[in-house]
C-alpha cells in the first residue's frame, strides 16, 4: 500500500495504550505489521509509560485501566489481574504478551528525534537506539502516540532554583523510603499527589499537601461520567482550537474512594493553598508563614511530548497543535493518538479504531 519510494505506509511513534490500539486496528484492516506499518518505541521494555511508573502504584489505586482491544483473545484482562502487584509489572507483562500475540514487531529502543518533510510528498522519520545508531524511515503517514510522560511539567515559583533540598517530579519518584524521616511537601491536586501522600504517611517525618485550587472530592468512588465527559469535551475544544490542553483533573475532581476517605479522616489528605515562594530551606506562603522542608514532590502533571514534530511546524500561536478527530488540521499526513480528549486508556482505545480507519482511507487516496 506504500507509495513508490517510501519504506512503509505508516509509522506509529509510541507503543503505549494508544499506539498499540492503533496497531491492532491497522492490522484488522489488513495492514501487515513490520512491513506496511512500523511501530517505533523509546521503550526499553513493554508497557508504555506504565513501565516507568513508581513501584507503589497498584492497579487497585489507579483509575480504571481498560483492556487493549482484542486482549480477550489472549485470555487476560486487567479486570481480573492481581491488583496488589505493581501496576508497572502487570501492564508491562500484559502488553508484552499482546505485542507477541499480534506479532507487532515493535522496534525498541527507538527514540524518534525528528519527523521532517521528505523531498517528495512523504515524511522522513529519524530515530536512534538511545546511542549512536541513527536510522531513517520514509512513510506516507505518521501516527504520533507519544503520550506525556516524557514531558513533565513543573510550574515556576520565585526561588525555585535556590532550594537546597531535593525536588522530584512524579516521573522521578521511586518509592516512599527515599524520603524516610524527611519533611516533605507534595504539590498537586490529582490522584498522583494523593497516592504519594498516602505512601509517605508514617515514613516522612512531616508531610504537607498544597494545591493550586480546592480539591473537589466526589462521592461515587469512580470518575463521574458526566464530569468526565465535560472535561473531555474541554480537551477536545482546546485541541481543535490549537490551544494548550487544560488539566483533566481540574474538570473531573478526585474520587472519594474508601482509601481516600480514610486518608481525609486521618488528616493526611488535607490540602493547603499554594505557597508563594521557595527559599533555600523551605517554602513561604503570602501571609509570611514559613515551613522548613527537605524535599518538594511536584505532582503537577505533564505536557504532550511533541518535540520531535517541531520541523513540521504544527504548533499554533495559541500554544498547542490543532487536532480534530485525531488528525492534524495543518498536515493531514499526521495523526495524534492518545492526545487531548483521548488521554485515558479508554480514550486511547477509541482513538485506535477511529484513527486506523482514517489512516486507511488516507492511504487509499494516494
Ligand atoms: P504512554 O503510555 O505514555 O505511551 C507512549 C509511548 O511513546 C511510550 O512507550 C514512550 O516511551 C513512547 N515515546 C514517547 N516519545 C517517543 C519518541 N520520541 N520516540 C519513540 N517513542 C516515544 N489512564 C487511565 O485510563 N487509567 C488510569 O488509571 C491512569 N492512571 C494514570 C496514572 C498516572 C500517574 C499518569 C501520569 C497517567 C495515568 N493515566 C491513566 C493516563 C495514562 O497515562 C493513559 O491513559 C495511557 O496509559 C496513556 O497511553 P499512551 O499510549 O497515550 O501514552
Image: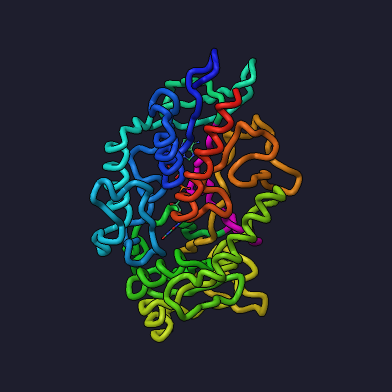
Whether residue 87 is situated above or below residue 308 in the rendered picture: below
Q: Residue at x 35, y 53 (%)?
A: 67
Whether residue 184 is situated above or below residue 100 in the rendered picture: below
- Magenta span: chief secondary structure: loop
Q: Residue at x 60, y 46 (%)?
A: 325
In the displayed structure, does residue 254 sit left or right of residue 313? Answer: left
Q: Which residues are magenta?
A: 142-162
Corner quadrant of residue 252: bottom right
Q: Residue at x 60, y 66 (%)?
A: 230
Question: Is residue 174 at all visible to an observer of this figure?
Answer: yes
Q: Residue at x 38, y 56 (%)?
A: 66
Residue 347 picture location, percent across and down: 49, 54
Corner quadrant of residue 181: bottom left
Nearer to the camera, 163 or 213: 213
Residue 232 picture location, percent across and down: 58, 60
Q: Is residue 207 magenta?
A: no
Residue 212 picture location, percent across and down: 61, 70
Outermost residue, right direction? 317
Whether residue 24 is situated above or below residue 246 in the rendered picture: above
Nearer to the camera, 10 or 269: 10
**What coloring was used for the rendering?**
rainbow
Nearer to the camera, 163 or 38: 38
Outermost residue, top direction? 5
Corner quadrant of residue 154: bottom right
Question: Is residue 42 at all visible to an observer of this figure?
Answer: no
Amino acid at each position: 500500500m506504500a507509495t513508490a519510494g517510501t519504506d512503509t505506509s505508516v509509522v506509529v511513534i509510541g507503543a503505549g495504550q494508544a499506539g498499540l490500539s492503533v496497531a491492532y486496528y491497522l492490522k484488522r484492516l489488513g495492514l501487515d505489521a513490520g512491513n506496511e506499518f512500523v511501530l517505533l518505541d523509546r521503550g526499553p521494555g513493554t508497557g508504555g509509560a506504565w513501565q516507568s511508573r513508581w513501584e507503589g502504584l497498584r492497579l487497585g489505586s489507579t483509575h480504571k485501566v481498560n483492556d487493549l482491544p482484542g486482549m480477550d483473545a489472549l485470555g487476560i484482562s486487567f479486570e481480573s489481574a492481581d491488583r496488589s502487584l505493581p501496576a508497572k509489572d502487570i501492564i508491562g507483562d500484559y502488553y508484552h504478551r499482546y505485542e507477541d500475540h499480534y506479532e507487532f514487531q515493535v522496534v525498541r529502543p527507538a527514540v524518534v528525534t525528528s519527523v521532517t518533510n521528505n523531498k517528495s510528498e512523504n515524511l522522513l522519520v529519524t530515530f536512534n537506539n538511545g546511542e549512536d545508531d541513527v536510522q531513517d524511515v520514509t512513510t506516507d503517514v505518521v501516527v504520533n502516540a507519544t503520550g506525556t510522560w516524557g514531558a513533565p511539567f513543573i510550574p515556576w515559583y520565585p526561588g525555585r532554583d535556590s532550594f537546597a533540598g531535593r525536588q522530584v517530579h512524579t516521573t522521578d519518584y521511586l518509592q516512599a523510603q527515599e524520603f524516610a524521616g524527611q519533611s516533605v511537601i507534595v504539590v498537586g491536586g490529582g490522584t498522583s499527589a494523593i497516592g504519594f501522600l498516602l505512601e509517605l504517611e508514617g515514613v516522612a517525618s512531616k508531610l504537607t499537601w498544597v494545591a493550586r485550587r480546592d480539591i473537589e472530592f466526589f462521592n461515587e468512588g469512580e470518575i463521574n461520567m458526566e464530569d468526565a465527559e465535560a472535561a473531555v469535551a474541554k480537551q477536545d475544544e482546546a485541541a481543535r482550537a490549537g490551544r494548550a490542553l487544560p488539566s483533566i483533573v481540574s474538570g473531573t475532581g478526585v474520587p472519594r474512594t474508601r482509601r481516600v476517605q480514610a486518608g481525609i479522616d486521618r488528616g493526611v489528605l488535607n490540602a493547603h493553598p499554594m505557597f508563594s515562594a521557595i527559599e533555600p530551606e523551605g517554602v513561604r506562603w503570602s501571609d509570611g508563614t514559613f515551613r522548613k522542608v527537605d524535599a518538594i514532590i511536584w505532582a503537577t502533571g505533564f505536557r504532550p511530548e511533541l518535540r520531535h514534530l517541531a520541523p513540521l511546524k504544527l504548533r499554533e500561536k495559541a500554544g498547542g497543535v490543532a487536532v480534530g478527530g485525531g488528525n492534524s488540521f495543518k498536515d493531514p499526513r499526521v495523526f495524534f493518538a492518545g492526545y487531548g480528549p483521548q488521554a485515558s486508556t479508554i480514550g486511547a482505545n477509541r482513538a485506535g479504531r477511529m484513527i486506523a480507519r482514517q489512516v486507511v482511507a488516507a492511504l487509499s487516496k494516494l
